Amino acid sequence: MDTYSFLRELADSWVLLALTCFFIGTIVWSFRPGSRKTHEDTADIPFRNETIPTTLEQEDGK
């Protein structure tokens, strides 16, 4: 068996299985019960710095 055939069979079976398990593990990890606070904190990132002075907007004529 040459190297290409061996690597092709390996990729078609075991590597596919390993990547599928990694994908399912990632999904399970992200939806675990303890991650709610982390996801809520991450979702609030765009709203953290809303203290831009409105006087700058009025001076620019906007």
Image (cartoon, rainbow, N blue to C red):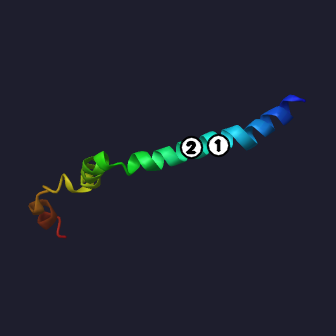
x and y percentages locating residue 48 in the rendered image: 19, 52
Give the CA distance from mark 1 to mark 2.
6 Å
x and y percentages locating residue 39 in the rendered image: 30, 51
Residue linked to disc 2? 21
Crowding around mark 1 (Cα neighbors within 10 Å: few <14, some 14 to 19, many 20+) is few
Residue 61, relative to residue 6: is it above or below?
below
Residue 14, relative to residue 36: is it above or below?
above
Q: Quadrant of residue 52?
A: bottom left
> Please, which residue is most extreme toward the bottom here?
62
Residue linked to disc 1? 17
x and y percentages locating residue 2 in the rendered image: 89, 29
Q: Which residue is painted at 79% across and 39% down in the image?
A: 9
Task: Give the amino acid type for the residue marked by disc 2 in the picture.
Answer: Cys
Q: Quadrant of residue 1?
A: top right
In the displayed structure, does residue 22 sit left or right of residue 39?
right
Tell whether label 2 touches label 1 (CB within 8 Å): yes
SS class of the residue under badge 2? helix
Front one among 16 and 41: 16
Q: Which residue is painted at 11% across and 62% down in the image?
A: 54
Task: Give the amino acid type for the residue marked by disc 1 in the picture.
Answer: Leu
Q: Quadrant of residue 29?
A: top left
SS class of the residue under badge 1? helix
x and y percentages locating residue 59 in the rendered image: 12, 64
